């Protein structure tokens, strides 16, 4: 028994083994015309040549573990694959071994679409075309059966365009009825073949008498069926369906195919495309901008037979392609021009029996360069004397729209055994050209585009950032029924301060106004700029700026906590609702720009916080997981909020854009991107690793353990209620110190003292203590819960420094970014705190040790935040506005909270000194050390709270022996 020598996938990744098929080894029968399908019923286990599914795309770093558990389907995991062959020539020149090898390749590569660019037969008679159709239907039927056996529902489809041999006798003349045969058999309205019509391989293997009888019997039946179908459609006032349409509605959604008949007015096999047909293509392509989903962005591929570009081969000396004038496309210039206008990516053709690839560059306008690729396939059914003349192309289309191809050359020539000779993989277009094409299609779809966006972010050492964006030349090619340009910005930590949102000077000069500007601190701004005219005509220039408070992590611990809290929030979202996209990563901080409208140039400038060691940022490009099916809002701009999807890493774009990030100054970096893509997010990331002194492991463990114990004590309602006596004693002493600060007429009796303890299980600051005049309870019944990084409380916790809030109406500075956190409404997490209630708020972070500040003090060793709040406009807390601002410039030195330092802080100044009088030597105002020490003394007294929380309530009466400092 002869062993199966078909093409099999080698484990070492080299060329497949030799395949040579003799007629005796081929299974007979209409649907079994290909030997390569013999092992189909055995399945993967029974078939040693069974090709494993191609590996899927790697998941991005933003995917949840829960999401990762759900396996992706094979159709979604691999690219859409097109199997391109040409010039099979069923007839006298056909070689069965070459065709069988094509079948083996198709079986191994698992295409989703089979494309044949002409010359399916030697002679364009109706019988031969019908036999070719039956053969191709068996071809794709077995490929579909393989998909079904693997659990895929993907139906392999066949698409063909006619060659010169398909339109007339011997490929040199075109006249009726031959000229309409191809459309009647392979067109979108092809008639149903009569029963008993054999495939070409079944017909070929029959004896000569049987072939003659079959042809005599079937040819009249085929013509009768063709004319009868045409007559019925004519009487029903329908199109015959025998024409080759430019576009078909039943094509796969992953690609747009353009069908061009290059045999119009054919003379001696020369090619020509009907000019009136090809000029209609632009209008049809414009309809794609209204299509839903990814359809406007999928690759556009034109199919024709004759070659539009010369193929550089030195020798053309045989058989069907022996005369060069037969090969040319006479109006190739017109065809290329119109295809360029329609932004066609790729042209597939055959005719010359040589594989070739080339790119044609062209200019769209004064600023934009374009490119169209041309790919030819060799013969898929004819043996030549030269080796390598047989070839097929595999075109892979990724979900992003990028295309690559592999040309597989086979056939040793001269009747030698058929085997693979060479293959190579290339990109259809480079990344820059791909981005330019996506920009043009996005502009068609959205009806607008922007020339340049300059986005600048300045981050300081406390996590506060200033963001400024300037937009130059925003064009609207389709008028929008509005006069408002949308503004969308968001943060994942902290808030955008509403008081700081303002228009740029150029926008103010133009008379632009804000619409839907937020009235309080928000994490997402969805506002607009009213320009006073319809969005059409001249381009717009505008800009804006704002401040973000507590938005950027300043410690490694904070990045981990923020990442964990984000995961907790996403886990709370009910099933079926869109979850907020994942943004944060442990140990990393990021600032981003999301491309919402087509953009030619992005200039992204970032100023990083300076420190004792330089930060080295890097670039990462993320894309929306549904891309290119990007959701659009009412302004025809991309929006991701409230929609299904996630941000996933685009490794290819990340590698490409990383080289465009450069340092232009001290701690200032700039990223320049040409044609950034809509639905993508361009991140500048850096590793958060602040300098910290080396601390012995034993001390670190001890400090951390005491911190966790203190947090547990404060978070226990029962324990805090039992400690009411010690807490009242501390309150009495603390208020004595506090009242000594206020000047005449500015009392501090109304100050409310509250403690917010960090709950590590939920990454929130929970209100565990409230000491207010007139309130009997010290433990709040409905505690306020402040999320990590929110408001002045979150700022004091993350910075390990005191922070003071003053109502902007009192401070006279509308640009102050600090804010008070307030929940929108009472709910599961606590009662609402009106943002307008408090006029002054002081926030002191508390260490677990009252005797001194530990060397590595930070949020990880901070118990919580103690706040002093007042509703009075003339509150005595105003005396601390200056001292608190000076204290916020730096942390307490180690050992400052010792008894000696506290006593020293309360000593009077020498009489007559300039600093006592509050002046520098040059006469300018200067704070005295006593004034500077006001904030420090209060911070010291606040820390004494931990001494009033002993191990048990019974021992609390002996804990108030510590001397309290006097206020300066």
Image: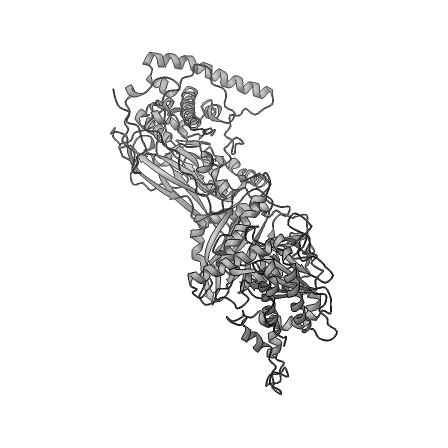
Q: Is residue 186 above or below residue 490?
A: above
Quarter of the image where one finds residue 108? top left
Q: Tell me: 358 left or right of 595.
A: left
In this orientation, does residue 624 appear? yes
Q: Looking at the picture, how far across and down is residue 358, in whole percent? A: 39, 44
Depth order, front residue of 861/233: 861
Q: Looking at the picture, how far across and down is residue 281, in whole percent? A: 53, 38
Q: Tell me: 765 left or right of 225.
A: right
Q: Looking at the picture, how far across and down is residue 657, in whole percent? A: 45, 54
Q: Looking at the picture, how far across and down is residue 816, in whole percent? A: 64, 65
Depth order, front residue of 309/549: 549
The C terminus, quarter of image: bottom right
The N terminus, quarter of image: top left
What count of labels does the image hold?
0
Q: Is residue 235 above or below residue 822?
A: above
In this orientation, does residue 443 appear? no
């Amino acid at each position: 028994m002869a062993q199966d020598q078909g093409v099999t996938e080698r484990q070492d990744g080299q060329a497949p083994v030799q395949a040579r098929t003799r007629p005796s080894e081929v299974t007979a029968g209409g649907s079994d015309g290909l030997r390569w399908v013999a092992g189909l019923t055995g399945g993967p286990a029974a078939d040693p040549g069974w090709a494993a599914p191609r590996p899927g795309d790697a998941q991005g770093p933003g995917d949840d573990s829960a999401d990762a558990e759900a396996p992706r389907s094979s159709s979604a995991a691999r690219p859409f694959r097109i199997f391109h062959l040409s010039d099979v020539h069923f007839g006298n020149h056909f070689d069965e071994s070459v065709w069988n090898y094509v079948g083996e390749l198709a079986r191994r590569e698992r295409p989703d679409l089979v494309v044949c660019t002409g010359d399916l037969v030697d002679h364009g008679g109706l019988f031969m075309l019908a036999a070719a159709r039956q053969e191709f239907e068996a071809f794709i039927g077995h490929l579909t059966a393989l998909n079904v056996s693997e659990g895929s529902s993907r139906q392999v489809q066949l698409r063909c365009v006619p060659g010169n041999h398909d339109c007339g006798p011997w490929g040199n003349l075109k006249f009726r009825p031959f000229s309409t045969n191809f459309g009647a058999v392979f067109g979108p309205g092809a008639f149903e073949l009569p029963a008993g019509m054999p495939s070409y391989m079944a017909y070929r293997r029959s004896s000569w008498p049987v072939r003659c009888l079959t042809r005599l019997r079937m040819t009249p039946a085929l013509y009768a069926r063709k004319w009868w179908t045409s007559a019925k459609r004519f009487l029903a006032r329908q199109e015959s369906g025998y024409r080759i349409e430019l576009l078909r509605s039943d094509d796969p959604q992953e690609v747009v195919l353009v069908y061009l008949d290059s045999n119009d007015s054919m003379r001696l096999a020369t090619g020509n495309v009907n000019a009136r047909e090809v000029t209609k293509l632009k209008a049809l392509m414009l309809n794609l901008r209204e299509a839903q989903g990814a359809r406007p962005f999928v690759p556009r591929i034109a199919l024709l037979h004759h070659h539009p570009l010369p193929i550089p081969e030195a020798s053309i000396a045989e058989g069907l392609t022996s005369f060069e004038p037969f090969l040319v496309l006479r109006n190739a210039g017109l065809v290329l021009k119109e295809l360029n206008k329609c932004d066609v990516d790729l042209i597939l053709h055959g005719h010359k029996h040589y594989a070739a690839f080339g790119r044609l560059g062209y200019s769209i306008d004064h600023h934009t360069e374009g490119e169209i690729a041309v790919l030819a396939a060799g013969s898929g059914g004819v043996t030549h004397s030269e080796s390598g003349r047989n070839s097929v192309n595999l075109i892979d289309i990724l979900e992003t729209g990028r295309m690559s191809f592999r040309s597989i050359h086979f056939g040793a020539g001269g009747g030698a055994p058929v085997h693979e000779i060479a293959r190579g993989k290339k990109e259809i277009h480079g990344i820059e050209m791909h981005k330019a094409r996506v920009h043009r299609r996005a502009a068609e779809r959205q009806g607008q585009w922007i020339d340049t966006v300059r986005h600048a972010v300045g981050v300081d050492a406390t996590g506060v950032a200033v963001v400024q964006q300037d937009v130059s030349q925003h064009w609207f090619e389709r008028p929008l029924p509005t006069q408002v340009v949308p503004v969308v910005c968001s943060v994942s930590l902290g808030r955008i301060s509403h008081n700081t949102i303002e228009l740029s000077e150029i926008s103010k000069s133009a008379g632009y106004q804000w619409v839907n500007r937020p009235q309080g601190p928000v994490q997402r701004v969805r506002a607009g700029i009213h320009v006073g005219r319809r969005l059409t005509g001249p381009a717009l220039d505008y800009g804006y700026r704002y401040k973000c408070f507590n938005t950027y992590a300043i410690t490694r611990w904070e990045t981990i906590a923020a990442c964990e809290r984000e995961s907790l929030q996403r886990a709370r979202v009910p099933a079926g609702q869109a979850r907020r996209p994942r943004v944060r990563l442990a140990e990393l901080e990021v600032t981003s720009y999301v491309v919402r409208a087509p953009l030619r140039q992005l200039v992204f400038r970032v100023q990083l916080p300076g420190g004792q060691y330089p930060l080295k940022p890097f670039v990462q490009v993320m894309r929306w997981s549904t891309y290119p099916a990007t959701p659009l809002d009412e302004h025809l701009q991309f929006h991701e909020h409230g929609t299904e999807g996630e941000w996933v890493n685009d490794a290819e774009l990340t590698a490409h854009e990383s080289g465009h990030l450069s340092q232009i100054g001290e701690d200032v970096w700039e990223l320049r991107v040409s044609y950034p893509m809509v639905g993508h997010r361009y991140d500048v990331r850096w590793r958060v690793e602040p300098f910290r002194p080396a601390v012995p492991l034993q001390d670190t463990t001890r400090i951390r353990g005491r911190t966790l114990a203190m947090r547990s004590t404060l978070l226990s309602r029962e324990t805090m209620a039992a400690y009411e006596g010690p807490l009242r004693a501390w309150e009495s002493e603390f208020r004595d110190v506090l009242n000594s600060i206020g000047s005449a007429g500015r009392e501090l009796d109304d100050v409310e003292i509250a403690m917010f303890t960090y709950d590590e299980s939920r990454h929130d600051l929970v209100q565990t203590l409230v000491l207010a005049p007139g309130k009997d309870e010290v433990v709040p019944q409905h505690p306020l819960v402040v999320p990590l990084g929110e408001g002045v409380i979150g700022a004091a916790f993350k910075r390990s420094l005191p922070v003071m809030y003053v109502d902007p109406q009192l401070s006279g500075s509308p640009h102050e970014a600090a804010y008070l956190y307030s929940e929108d409404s009472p709910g599961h997490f606590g009662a609402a705190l009106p943002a307008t209630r408090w006029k002054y708020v002081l926030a002191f972070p508390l260490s677990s040790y009252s005797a001194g500040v530990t060397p590595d003090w930070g949020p990880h060793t901070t118990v919580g935040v103690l706040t002093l709040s007042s509703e009075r406009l003339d509150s005595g807390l105003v005396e601390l506005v200056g001292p608190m601002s000076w204290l916020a410039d730096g942390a307490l030195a180690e050992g400052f909270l010792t008894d000696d330092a506290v006593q020293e802080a309360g000593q009077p100044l020498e009489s007559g000194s300039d600093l006592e009088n509050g002046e520098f030597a040059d006469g300018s105002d200067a704070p005295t050390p006593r004034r500077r020490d006001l904030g420090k003394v209060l911070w010291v007294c606040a820390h004494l709270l931990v001494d009033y929380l002993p191990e048990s309530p019974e021992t609390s009466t002996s804990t108030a022996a510590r001397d309290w400092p006097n206020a300066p």
